[in-house]
Amino acid sequence: MNPHAGKAQDIADRIARAVRSAAAVDARCTEALNGLKAAKGLEVTDATLEDMRRDTADVHAATVRHLVAGMPQNGSPAENKAWWEGLDEEQRREYLDVAPELIGMLDGIPAIARDEANRHYLPVLIAELERTGNDPAMLEGLRKIDDRLREPSKVPMFLLGVGDEGNGRAIISFGNPDTARNVSAYVPGLGTKLDAEFGGGTVKRALDTAIGAQRYDKSTASIVWLGYDAPQNIDVMSTADADKGAPAYNRFMAGLVATNQHDDPHVTAIGHSYGSLTVGTAAKQSGGIPGVDDIVLVGSPGVGVDRAADLGVPPQRVYVGAADNDIVTKLPTVPEALMHATGVAVRLPVPGFLSDPGGDDIYFGKDPAGKAFGAQRFAVDDGPHPVLDGEPIAAHSQYFTPETDRVSADNIARVVAGEYGITTEGHR
């Protein structure tokens, strides 16, 4: 006899009872409403609706507890995958319909199921923020994502994660990462949160990469991963957010490898700005970033290591884009910043003990675009000058965008598609 059969049946029975209980409460609520409507002079007051909302929430919470009991506890992506595959269709439907929030962010669950769960959960999040008014910026971000899901897209869109934790969570793929031979996951940096800008410009970066890469190989999916709290202001000077985000990113990447249908998919990790530090921190963990073949770092203030070889892939498979007018790629070390309080932080090498002899230290380690780091530096547009053109950060924001930097966008797309015919430029 299968030793797990009895437990599985018990879980299924509890789920069924919870669902029947929810249906019964719903029926009682409907009957009560009908009674209120039937009696002349009676109104459904705000207090009545609030009581009903609480009752419904209580039933939903009880149902979720039953569903959680049937899930792997702190399971790895591989264990989550095995659990999901062990459920029958009716059991899967109960999770997707009753508690989509349990499935939508669960690494190791197939992309199609995560997408369905998050599409169910998204209007719930929107409705709750509309009701409470707690976070108007996040509400706008969720609405932007909802709009994108409703609009035609040049590449099919999959909502692999959404939530209101911290500054918001959103994981969006253009292309199915389970069926694609080439999959990339891009980590954004400073100032990124679930808001209107994320739903517009940040998400477009993943779409542009997918469109560009599919010119070289149609079997390509490009993901933007906001599965952590990126720094919003002064906390950008600390590695704390990267330290917290790196394990979550590695777990997500392990899930991608677990659910991909190819024996050896080509996987690219991409980090922009502070996101490059998060990618670098993930690469330093034991075993490196699961399944990764190539690493792309753009607009980087340093990645927490001094050599490309320390990122868990051959150094020739680490690609760096650094515009000459991108001041983030020239952030000073702390001693240099103290010595040169200019108001605009740019790296100014200081002789002696305050600086490295080669002058290639930046805020979070060696300059990835420098020769000593040992990566391939690909060609990018210099971008607008921060002073002469009056655009301090424009050069930092255009790496993915073909309308403003076609060379950089194409180089990133080539790496993601496994094309590798990039155009290079000399190290700093």
Image (tube, helix red, strand yellow):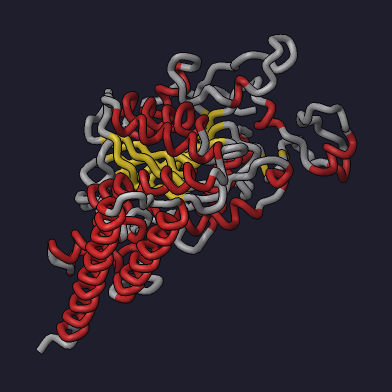
Pick the front one: 352 or 288:
288
**Residue drawn where x is 88% and y is 32% of the image:** 341
**Residue drawn where x is 42% and y is 25% of the image:** 411
Q: Residue reaching furthest front?
A: 40
Name the spot of residue 67 as percent of width and height, x first: 30, 70
Pick the front one: 41 or 63:
41
Pick the front one: 18 or 30:
30
Q: Is residue 259 at all visible to an observer of this figure?
A: no
Q: Is residue 386 at all visible to an observer of this figure?
A: yes
- Residue 196 higher or lower than 308, as above or below: above
> Image quadrant for the C terminus?
top right
Q: How many marks?
A: 0
Name the spot of residue 87 as percent of width and height, x first: 17, 67
Q: Residue reaching furthest left?
A: 1
Occupied quadrant, residue 276: top right
Name the spot of residue 204 as percent of width and height, x first: 42, 27
- Residue 197 higher or lower than 3, as above or below: above
Name the spot of residue 407 as percent of width and height, x first: 45, 18
**Residue drawn where x is 32% and y is 52% of the image:** 256
- Residue 111 higher or lower than 258, as above or below: above
> Image quadrant for the N terminus?
bottom left
- Position of residue 127 in the picture relative to residue 386 (left or right): left
- Residue 56 higher or lower than 154, as above or below: below
Occupied quadrant, residue 402: top left
